[in-house]
Image (cartoon, rainbow, N blue to C red):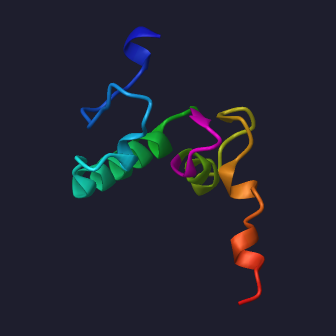
Amino acid sequence: YGARVETTNCQRTSTSTGVHYLTTIDRVLAGMEVMADTYIALRANRFIGNGQSNVSAMIAVMKDWAPGDCTLVGPSELMKRNLFVHLKQ
C-alpha cells in the first residue's frame, strides 16, 4: 500500500503478548497512542480493523461510515454477549 498507509510512532513488543499486558509499558503514553490512532481513523475515508479490538469496534460506531467504507475483520467485540453484566449480584 506504500504511502497510502499511515503509521505513528508507538510502543511495540517483539513477543506475542499484547503491549497493554506488559508491565514495562508507559500507560499514559499508551492511552495517548490509542487516542491518536482513533482520531486518525475517524478522519480517514476508509477503515479496516480487528473486530476483536475494542478500539476498532468503537471506531466502527463513532462515525457514520458509508456502506463498505468500514470493515471489521471478525465479529465486533461490542456485539459479544457480556455475561458478567447480566449476572445477578
Residue sitting nearer the eye, 49 or 69 = 49
**Is residue 81 found left or right of 69 in the rendered image?**
right
> In the rendered structure, does residue 53 fall within the stretch colored magenta?
yes
> Image point 74% across, 42% down: which residue?
75
Q: In the image, residue 37 lies at what x, y percent?
A: 39, 43
Which residue, as the protein is rendered here, is positioned at the far top? Answer: 2
Q: In the image, residue 66 lies at what x, y percent?
A: 69, 40
The answer to which quarter of the image holds residue 83 is bottom right
* Image: 63 above or below 13: below
Q: In the image, residue 52 lies at what x, y percent?
A: 63, 43
Q: In the image, residue 38 lies at what x, y percent?
A: 43, 47
**Is residue 36 found left or right of 49 in the rendered image?**
left
> Image point 58% across, 35% down: which residue?
49
Number of numbered discs:
0
* Image: 78 above or below 20: below
> In the rendered structure, does residue 60 fall within the stretch colored magenta?
no
Span of residues in magenta: 48-55
The answer to which quarter of the image holds residue 5 is top left
Residue sitting nearer the eye, 58 or 3 = 58
> Image point 51% across, 50% down: which residue?
55
* Quadrant holding the C terminus: bottom right
**Is residue 80 found left or right of 70 in the rendered image?**
right
> Image point 60% across, 36% down: which residue?
50
Which residue, as the protein is rendered here, is positioned at the far bottom? Answer: 89
